[in-house]
Amino acid sequence: MSDDLHFTTALDLAGLYESKRVSPVEVARAILERIERLNPILNCYCYCNRDDVLAAARQSEARWASGEPLGPLDGVPVSIKDLLLTRGWPTRCGSRLIGPEGPWDEDDPVVARLRESGAVLLGKVTTPEFGNSGITDSPLTGITVNPWDTSRTTGGSSGGSVAAVAAGLGPLSIGTDTGGSIRTPSSFCGLVGLKPTFGRVAQYPETDWGGISVSGPIARTASDAALLMTVIAQPDPRDGKSLPRDDRDYVAESAGGVEGWRVAFSPDLGFMPVGAEIAGIVAEAAGRFEALGARVEEVAPPFVDPIHIFNTIWSPIIATGLRARYSDDQLAGLGDETLEALDEVKDITLEDFVEAERQRDLLAHRMRVFHETYDLLLTPTAIVSPFETVYDFPPEWDRERAWVWELPTFPFNFSRQPALTVPCGFTEAGLPVGLQIVGPIYEDARTLRAARAYQEAYPTTDRRPPLD
C-alpha cells in the first residue's frame, strides 16, 4: 500500500476506511486538491463539482462510521467518461452540439451501479467528439495530454479516464471501447484497461454502436479492475442486450495464477507492422508466462487483416446515430473528424455493410474455435508509442491508413470477447508499453486472472509519471 493517498489502490482504500485509519472525506479532499493543481496541465476533467464530491464523501464517511457501507466501492473515488449519462451533471460527449442545460435526470447503468455501491463520483473526464477518434482532442474541450510526457497523446477515446488515473486524480475510471478506446490509451498511460464481453456491462441509451462498443474499468492494477467489474457487471432492464446476472466476485476469481494454461502468442497477428522496440518488450512479456507455469506457443490467429470490416461498419453506425438525433444544420457544427465519418458513409452500399457484418460474424466464430485450444491469446496492445499531440495519428502513417495503428484491438470488438491491456514495460524514452490479453467470450474473470498473475509477478506500479 502506498502512503500517498493519490496512488493508493481502491482495494487498499476500502481497507483503510474499514480500519478507520483514513476517511473518504480525507481521500476526496486530497484528490480534489490534486485535480485543481494538475488538470490545467493535463486537461482530463471537463466537469468536477467540489461540493458534490465532498457531500458524497461525507455520506460515505458516515456509513463507514456506523459499520454499514453500501458495497465494496463505498467511498472510493471514480471518474466517468463524458459519454455516459450522469444524473445532475452535463454529459456533452465532447461536442458543441450538446449544451450544458440538460435536463440531466438519468444515470447510465454503470453510473447507477456505482452510486448503489457508494462510490464517490469525482466528475466527468474528456473524450473526443462522440468517442470518434484514436486521440483525445475535441472541439469542445481541446487536447488531453499524457502524464508520462505532456507533449504526447493519451490515445483515445478514453483519454481523460487514463490521464486521470495515471496522474493520481482518482484510482478508478469508467471508459468505453468501440475499437480499442479503453485498451490503447490504457497501454499508452501504463494502466490496466478491460474491454469486457459485450453485454456483460449494461449500457443505455443506444451506446453499443451496433454491438461493438462496451463500457469497462480502467485502473492501475488488475485487482482494482476486478473490483470495479464486480460492481458494474450487472444487467439493466433498459438494456435488452445485457447478459443475465452472474453475481461473480471478480476479485476472488482473479486469484490463482495460470499454471498449466495453454497460451497463444501472436507478435503481429500476422499483418501488423509492430515497432521494433515495442515488439521486443511484448515478446519478453509473453515469454514470462512460461515462468508463471503456462505453456506459450507462438501462433497466428485464424483471421486476416480486418481493417476493411471496421471501415465499412463504423461509419454507417455513427452516421445513422447522429442523423437520427440532429438536423443537417446542427451536424454542420461537428468537428472535422466526425464530419469525415459522415462523409465516408456515402461510398458504402447496403451490400457492402451486410457483407462486412457477415465477415465480422465469421471472425467471431473462428475465435471461438481458436479458444477451444487456447486459454488466452497474447498480442501487443499498441504497435506504436504515444506520439506528439501535434499529430492526430502517428506521423509515419498516411491518412488513408490512419486507423491501422489500432489494429491489435478492434478485431476483438467484432468477436465480442473480453480483452484487456496490462503494463509490461517502458521504452527507452520512458513511455509505457502494454500487453494485450484476450480471453474466450464470457471469460472476463479468466482474462483478469491472467493479468493479475502477470502484474503481481512483474509489477510496474512503483513507477509514476514525472509530474511532481
Image (tube, helix red, strand yellow):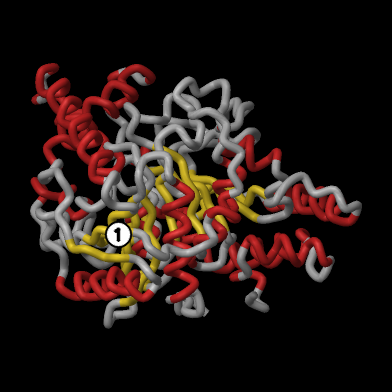
Which corner quadrant of the image does residue 112 belong to?
top right
| Residue 293 position in % (x across, y down) | 38, 70
Picture mark count: 1
**Residue 40 visible here:** no
Viewer-proximal residue among 91 and 336? 91
Q: Residues within 10 Å of mark 1 (few under 14, many from 20)?
A: many
Under mark 1, the amino acid is Val
| Residue 364 position in % (x across, y down) | 25, 35
Which corner quadrant of the image does residue 3 belong to?
bottom right
| Residue 237 position in % (x across, y down) | 57, 21
Viewer-proximal residue among 425 and 350? 425
The single residue placed furthest to the front in the displayed view is: 260
Query: Residue at the spot x=46%, y=55% of the render?
Result: 448
Which corner quadrant of the image does residue 130 belong to?
top left
Where the N terminus falls, by quadrant?
Answer: bottom right
Numbered disc 1: secondary structure: strand
Viewer-proximal residue among 255 and 174? 255
Horizontal side of 101 relative to 260 (left or right) equals right
Viewer-proximal residue among 356 and 61? 356
Query: Residue at the spot x=48%, y=42% of the render?
Result: 82
Horizontal side of 25 relative to 37 (left or right) equals right
The single residue placed furthest to the bottom in the displayed view is: 428
Figure check: 79 above or below 357: below
Figure check: 8 above or below 369: below
Query: Residue at the spot x=79%, y=63% of the render?
Result: 23
Label 1 sits on residue: 263
**Residue 427 visible here:** yes
Query: Residue at the spot x=60%, y=31% of the render?
Result: 107
| Residue 361 position in % (x across, y down) | 22, 29
Horizontal side of 61 relative to 316 (left or right) equals right
